[in-house]
Amino acid sequence: MARATWATKAQLLARLRPHALPGIPGTAPTELLPDVCKFLRGLTPPELRLVLAAYAGHPPDSPALHLVATSQHAAVAKKAPTRLPDVIVQLLVGGSRLGSASQLIDAADTIAKYASCDCQAGTEFWTVFAERAARLSASNTLDAQQLSGILAACAGWEKRCGGARDGRRSGGAWGHMLRSVGGRLADPQLLDTLSLQDVVAVARHAAHCEEPQLRLAASIGFRVGHEADVVPRTDAQGHMEKALTPEDLIDLIGAAGKLGGRLHMMTRSLADRLEPQAMFLPDASLVRLCSHLGSLEMFPQHLMQAMEEILPGRVPTLSPKDLLRLLRTAGRLRWRVPAVLGPLVESLRSEVTNNASFDGSVLASVVYELYRLDLWDEAITQAACERLGSIEIRSLTWKATSNILLALTYFSFPTPDLYRQLLQELLRAKDLAPEAIFQLKTVEMAIRVGHCPVSFKDLGQIASKWLFGIRGASTVPEAAGESEFAKDISSVAQSICWTHQSEVEVGPYVLDFAAVTGPDHEEGRAPPGWDDQKPGRSLVRCCVALEADGPSR
């Protein structure tokens, strides 16, 4: 009798196996569920993972996946949860089924790929997983493949469900575990045991987890850079190690920023290796590369020159989502290339006026990027204001609200009602970030000097008093950071005998100033009226302002 039972279970698993392909949620027949429930308690962890993968493609709320408390499987369904996937997760992580490191990592990989995002047992599992994985990592008992598997599982869950955020809220166990695992993988003796493709996967997964890993990023950069100068290695089976593909290089550039540092040398090296292949990249990869460079706020000269030649012909074929990503990149880099921005704005205008595929919040971000690029487009701005006036403005974040308010002020766009609504939303914010206060100070000054076509009377008494109070609010001034380009300007100023001081705070701004000296002025001496005790005021009184804006055009 026992032999017949196992044969029946083997036949059941054989029917489910074609629906449990790696990484693809299956839709196994629901008529097999009675047989699945009959053997559920006796399945081994690998068999449980197979069943979970086979049914993961069904909708989580599918009635067919809810267990019914019949005599056939009453022991399984007598207590919540009653959904088959949730029961499998409970069985997979319960008891002694996570006794070894391999079992723990295999369970994490399966839950990350196939468990429902609202499965309580799955969410609770990640807290336990973070604590145990951190202990295993600290004990130096995990090899490089196991450490890489931990990052892959965490990245998969974060990408699917944002599950990592639950772990971050639970006492910081999630972040501690990721730093511990990343620190171990940063050891060259461990990282060198992985193939080059596996190293790229580590970078990609660590970036998805969004935990700063500067040491790991530096080790990956060293390994990738070293591999470019040596003969390709062979693995344990004698196969030649595959070279990095353009997609790998793009992923590494993106990881360099998300892991906590720009790593200029690594990024420039990767950009130089990618530049000859840029023209062969598909549209989505080109936009992804631009997006990564925008996040890094880097401008690799040779690669960007190649992009300036490639993008004008590609822009008309981009999807609306990619058009937005490219515009954000241009805004962050202040990348003012007419050959690219012309067709880009034209395509966006066509989407706005013909397809109406963008809602008000998206159009608000478009207007803000146009402001950062100093580009005026009446059709896009008008559409943004109309749709913002017709949607729930309260859905905007404080950052989006202050951004669009600043952009409309800069463009002097006449829409008093929208100004008032935006300010009323900011009034409800309990604590505004320094960036918002900085922007509101600029808005208040523009209204006060008459640059904006809106008066304080148009805004109402409460909003006007609040905005006037912002004028004297104490906040951190604009972040100072002298670039190499700014240093070059400073050197030129010194070479022509200009007395100057860099990064001078003037109200909410930080500017580079250079003193204008007369023809009879002696080299090395300050101009007339200069007060060393008050360099800021002296510069305002007798100097002109120079703003170094890097690669802007």
Image (cartoon, rainbow, N blue to C red):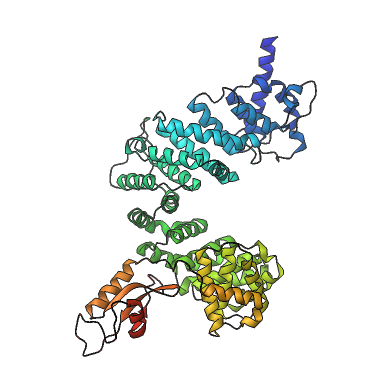
- Residue 483 appears in which quarter of the rendering? bottom left
Instruction: Decide which of 23, 39 is in the foreground and name it.
Output: 39
- Residue 463 appears in which quarter of the rendering? bottom right
Q: Where residue 211 appears, x then y in whole percent?
A: 47, 47
Question: At 72% across and 24% down in the image, what residue appears?
Answer: 76
Q: Where residue 513 appears, x then y in whole percent?
A: 34, 77
Question: At 28% across and 44% down in the image, what residue appears?
Answer: 230
Seen in the image, is 530 located left or right of residue 380? Answer: left
| Residue 41 seen from this side | yes
Classify 241 as above or below 413.
Answer: above
Quarter of the image with the C terminus is: bottom left
Instruction: Decide which of 315, 93 is in the foreground and name it.
Output: 93
Seen in the image, is 2 located left or right of residue 451? Answer: right
Q: Where residue 233 appears, x then y in whole percent?
A: 32, 38
Q: Number of labelled discs? A: 0
| Residue 366 seen from this side | no
Classify 35 as above or below 351.
Answer: above
Classify 311 as above or below 205.
Answer: below
Quarter of the image with the N terminus is: top right
Q: Where residue 364 appears, x then y in whole percent?
A: 60, 68
Question: At 46% across and 34% down in the image, what residue appears?
Answer: 134
